[in-house]
Amino acid sequence: MNYIHDFFSSTIQLNIFWVIVITLLYIVIHNYRHKYFNRFLDIYLNYIPVLTHEFGHILFNKLSNGKAKDLVIVASPSERAATSQQGYAITQSKSRTGQAITTFGGYIMPPLMLFIGVAAIKSTYPSLFIAAYLVIFIYFVILTSRKLLPTLIIIGLIILLYTLFHNENPLMMTYVVTFTYHFIIGVLLGEVLQSSWTIGRLTFSSHSVTWDGSTLKALTHIPTAIFSLIWICINLFVVYLLITNYLVN
């Protein structure tokens, strides 16, 4: 029990240099994901951002009194290439308004979690941020129709946590928590920046592309650019907070 308390009471000093390194690595790998080895690295690096995005659909669906049926992260490079999908959530909404809220929530979740992660650093219990992701992941494992890889990840996490608690090594636990925190913040920041570019590109694309923005336009008859502007403004605001807290100061 003492080590569980140590986990939740761990304090973390955010090293913005390592966050930027992870962020740049995320963006570079994603933009060169069509190269053979990068296809696998891209899946590894954006597993959490994709989970966060799709969980955003689920969460906003629940908030609008809907029902979640499935949540899938596509972990096969060939399937991603064939379908152009990184993941998807299957939900049931009771109205067009509920469906619009569900669709809107996807791009809201990554900057929201990045904001929570940065804010948690300054709190007494930053490890609650990691615990929140553990809860999200457990929910994902329960809901998803593709349980093999998530189950293997859960088993790996259980073995890791058992080893940390069994060996009674607080220093190692601090290292694991710190690395995990920097990794999550780094890939979320990478996703926020990358998605801002993607949103802009899709909004002004000359080709007809089905994505969250076009779906919202069909549901609400509000121009896609309005939703895109909201998403990008939220992204830039969170990035601004990160810069002013850890770079300017």
Image (cartoon, grey):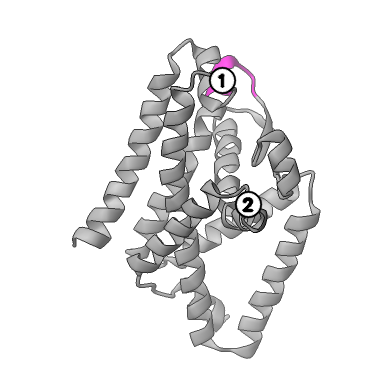
Look at the image and say whether residue 58 sits in the magenta stretch. no
Residue 82 location in percent, x, y?
Answer: 73, 36
Residue 22 location in percent, x, y?
Answer: 45, 62
Front residue of 154 and 47: 47
- Label whose residue precedes the other's in the sequence (2 or 1): 2
Q: Mark 2 against mark 1, which lies toward the viewer? A: 2
Above or below for 99 versus 234: above
160 left or right of 225 in image: right
- Label 1, on which residue? 215
Q: Residues within 10 Å of mark 2 (few under 14, many from 20)?
A: few
**Residue 235 visible from this viewpoint:** yes
Helix, strand or loop at mark 1? helix
Front residue of 122 and 220: 220
Which segment is the magenta one? 93-100
128 left or right of 15 in image: right
Res. 35 mark: 2
Q: Amino acid at mark 1?
A: Thr
Quarter of the figure with residue 134: bottom right
Residue 165 location in percent, x, y?
Answer: 62, 82
Above or below for 125 versus 38: below
182 left or right of 83 in image: left
The residue most toward the front is: 35
